[in-house]
Image (tube, rainbow, N blue to C red):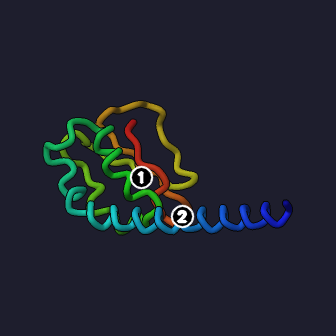
Amino acid sequence: MRKTRQVSFALALVLAGAGLVAGCDQNSADADAGKDKLAGAFDGELKDCAAAAHALSVWNGKPYAEATSVLQPQGPVTSIRVIRPGTMVTKDYRIDRLNVDLDDKDVVTKIYCG
């Protein structure tokens, strides 16, 4: 009985690891394949800031320096606010402003409107 549990646990770990690797490959493939679409994300295809934020969320976990060419005010987004750790921000809500949260290494952690 104990050996069966050990084998089951080991199998579960292997399958979980395979799922993580497959997920990583898919995310990087999606980001690479979607760069052209994201470059034109604001040219009328997306009707509001929330749709733009959703489309641009593929940049989460990537360096901000790589995303700056895409994260520009266009279409429904009239301004971009980059928020680094410790940055003071106003609490006003603007439906046309895209917020880009960065960590201390300038990696995008969240993209949202407001």
Outermost residue on the front side: it is: 1
Picture quadrant where residue 32 is located: bottom left
Q: Residue at x 66, y 66 (%)?
A: 11
In the image, residue 73 above or below residue 67: above
Of the numbered discs 2 and 1, the one sitting upstream in the chain is: 2
Q: Position of residue 35 (x, y in %)?
A: 26, 63
- Secondary structure of the residue carrying tag 2 is helix
Residue under circle 2? 20
User: Label 1 neighbourhood size at 10 Å, few (<14), some (14-19), many (20+)?
Assistant: some
Q: Residue at x 59, y 64 (%)?
A: 15
Outermost residue on the right side: it is: 2
Name which residue type carries label 2: Leu
In the image, residue 31 above or below residue 48: below
Q: Position of residue 95 (x, y in %)?
A: 32, 32
Q: Position of residue 97 (x, y in %)?
A: 33, 40
The answer to which of 68 and 34 lies nearer the viewer is: 34
